Amino acid sequence: MSNYIDHSVAETTLKIVEEVCRDFDGNGIFGVGAGAALRAMARHWKDHLHDGHKPRIISEDIDEMKNQLEVMRAEVMRRVSEHAPSPIDGKMSNYIEQPVASQDKAVELKNTLGQVATAPFYIWANDDCANKTNNFNEAKAIRLTLFNEGGESVYIVDADGVEVVDAEIEAHEALANAGYFAGARKPDVKPEFPGAFMVNDPQDSEGYAIVGDDIASLILEARDHLTAHASDREVSNYIEQAPATKLVEVRLSALTRVEYMEVVEVPANITQAELDDLVNARYRQVDGGEFTSDPEYWERGTCEAVETDMPNTAPSMMAFRTAHGLHIERADAAAQTVESSGPTP
C-alpha cells in the first residue's frame, strides 16, 4: 500500500528553482556558476520530491554544497601554492612580498553590527583600553602585538564602541586557536628568505613557516594552509569511514487465485451440510481449464532480501541512507545524478 504524494508540490518547487536560476543569470560569472549548480542538483531533487520528501531538502543540500565549495576552494589554493613557481628555485616561495597599493581592493570597513566603522579605533586588552589610533591597519598591528605579549581578550572597537573584525583578524583568530604564531620575525626561521614578519606552526612536524613584509598576507596565506590541511583530514576520514556496499537479491512472491462460478437450482429447504456436499462435489467435477483469474485477489507470499552469490552482476536498483531515511532509486538514475551533480557527501 503506497502513500499519496502530491506531485504538484514537487513540480511547483522545481519551477521556482528554475525561475530563481533565470533571475540570477545576469549576475556575472558567479550567477552563471551558481545557476548551473542548482540546475544540476534539480535532477536529484526531482526524484526526492516525487518520493515525498519536503522542499526543505533543497535548503539542506545547498548548505552542504556551500561547505563543499569552501573545501574545494581551499584545495585549489593549496595545489596552486604547491605548483606556483618561485623566483629562486622554481618551488613554492616562503616569502610573500608587500602588495602594491594599487592592487588592493577598496572595501568599506564595517563593524560587527554591519555599520560603517568610523575612527578613531580603540584597542582593548585585559579589560582595559590599551591604545587608540585613527588608522585601522595600525590598530591591527597594535592588537597583534598585545596578543603576542600575552594580552587576553584583545579586540578593536570603533568610535561608537562596536567591535571591528575583518578577514585578517578572523584568520588570525583561527590560526591562534590552532596553535600558530604570527608576528615579528625570528632570525632562525627561514633565514634564506627576507622579511620582517613570520607565521609558523611550532607543532608542525614539517616545520611549516612563511616569512615576508606584509603580515596580513602572511596570516591569510597561513589560514589557507590550515584550512587545506583540515580539508585533507576531513576527506581522509570520509574515505576511511565510508560504509562499504554489497549486492543483495530482493525476492518477492505473491499468491493469486483462479475461480469458477455457476448457478445451480437447489431445493428451497436445502441444508448447509447439503450445500457443503454440493460444493465439494462440483470442485471434483469441474475441469481446471474452466477456471478464470481473479484480478481482485492478491496476497503477499514469501518476501526476503538475501546476499547474492553473483557479486559481479550490475544492480538495477540502488538504496542508500539519507537524512530522511532509506532512499531507493534506479541504478541508472543514480549514475546520472553523480555524473551531473558530482558526489554527494
Image: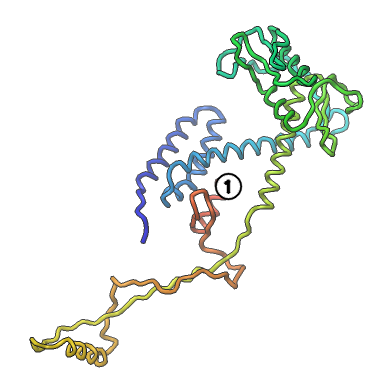
Which quadrant is the N terminus positioned in? bottom left
Q: How many marks?
A: 1
Q: Quadrant of residue 285 in the image? A: bottom left
Secondary structure beneath dot 1 equals loop
Front one among 239 and 160: 160
The residue wearing badge 1 is: 344
x 75%, y 30%: residue: 222
**Residue 213 point in image, percent of width and height:** 81, 19
Front one among 202 and 254: 202
x 78%, y 21%: residue: 150
Tell whether 151 sits left or right of 40.
right
Front one among 198 and 146: 146
x 64%, y 53%: residue: 242
Check the image and tell me how it is coloured.
rainbow
Q: Quadrant of residue 12 in the image? A: top left
Whether 317 is drawn above or below 179: the answer is below
Q: Amino acid at mark 1?
A: Thr
Whether 255 is drawn above or below 338: the answer is below
Whether 104 is drawn above or below 31: the answer is above
Tell whether 199 sits left or right of 8.
right
**Residue 217 point in image, percent of width and height:** 75, 23
Q: Quadrant of residue 244 in the image? A: bottom right
